[in-house]
Image (tube, rainbow, N blue to C red):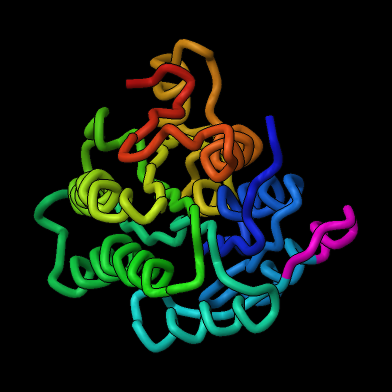
């Protein structure tokens, strides 16, 4: 696979989990990576340290993608350090799993603003640059938009909207050479799922039983896929939503 054409890549929500793995994979292709975080500065700096220790270029930048001012500052900082941003990975997301009766207006606003509005705001910021040529946006969705797990209706709804946004944005931005794709990870072993007690649970056992490749995912499973989509090797792929779940569907 050829290296990423990117001079600068922003990965949102990259202080841990899938985002950290994606940031490392992009850095491995030669991209300068902006490791975005909202709260976990220590985790973001660990990701940066891991990248730089391997000869890569990276900085950590705090920003809440649900706020336009923060997004503008994120892109300004990236451009100051490395130049125009031509790879964007929208990985930042929040979720609270609950039955339908437990969904509140506050939780609706929290998930929709981060998961959907955040993706829209960062996409707008990349597209607002008038000094980029070919560029690639990769949105991180979920296999749950196909498997529809119980107690995840709000999260799945937000990510289903991200999938639809991906396809429409690809049509709008394609004439400018900006490609927009999404990946749908399956159940994975990350800091976030560990905090929810997923590893070792009955839910994990069922997910493994339903997955043809017989295990849950890891951050290392998704980084190479994102790096491919960011590269010139994927120059003819846009508007696609790619399942990456070990066959779970």
- Asked whether 139 or 128 is in front, the reply is 128
In which quadrant of the rendered image does the N terminus lie?
top right
The front one of 203 and 108 is: 108
Q: Is residue 113 left or right of residue 122?
A: left
Residue name at image x 33 percent, y 70 percent: 124
Q: Is residue 115 left or right of residue 202?
A: left
Q: Is residue 238 visible?
A: yes
Q: How many marks?
A: 0
Residue shown at the point (34%, 63%) measured from the top left: 119
**From which residue to which does the magenta span run?**
49-58
Q: Judge whether residue 30 is colored magenta.
A: no
Q: What residue is shown at x 69% (from left), y 35% (from top)?
A: 2
Extreme top residue here?
A: 212
Residue 67 position by quadrant: bottom left
Residue 36: give x, y in percent of width and height.
Answer: 57, 70
From this view, report whether residue 157 is shown above or below residue 243: below
């Amino acid at each position: 696979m050829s290296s990423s054409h990117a001079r600068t890549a922003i990965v949102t929500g990259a202080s841990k989990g899938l985002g950290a793995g994606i940031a490392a994979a992009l850095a491995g292709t030669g991209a300068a990576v902006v490791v975005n975080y909202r709260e976990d500065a220590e985790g973001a700096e660990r990701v940066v340290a891991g990248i730089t220790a391997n000869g890569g270029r990276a900085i950590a930048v705090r920003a809440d993608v649900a706020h336009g001012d923060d997004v503008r500052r994120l892109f300004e900082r990236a451009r100051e350090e490395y130049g125009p941003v031509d790879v964007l990975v929208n990985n930042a997301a929040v979720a609270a799993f609950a039955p339908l009766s437990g969904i509140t207006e506050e939780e609706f606003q929290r998930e929709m603003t981060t998961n959907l509005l955040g993706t829209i705001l960062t996409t707008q910021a990349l597209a607002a640059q008038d000094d980029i040529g070919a560029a690639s946006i990769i949105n991180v969705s979920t296999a749950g938009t196909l498997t529809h797990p119980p107690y995840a209706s709000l999260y799945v709804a937000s990510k289903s909207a991200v999938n639809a946004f991906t396809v429409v944005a690809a049509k709008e931005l394609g004439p400018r050479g900006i490609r927009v794709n999404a990946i749908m990870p399956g159940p994975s072993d990350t800091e976030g799922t560990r905090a929810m007690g997923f590893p070792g649970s009955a839910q994990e056992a069922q997910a493994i039983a339903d997955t043809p490749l017989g295990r849950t995912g890891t951050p290392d499973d998704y980084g190479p896929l994102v790096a491919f989509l960011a590269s010139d090797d994927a120059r003819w792929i846009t508007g696609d939503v790619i399942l990456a779940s070990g066959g779970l569907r």
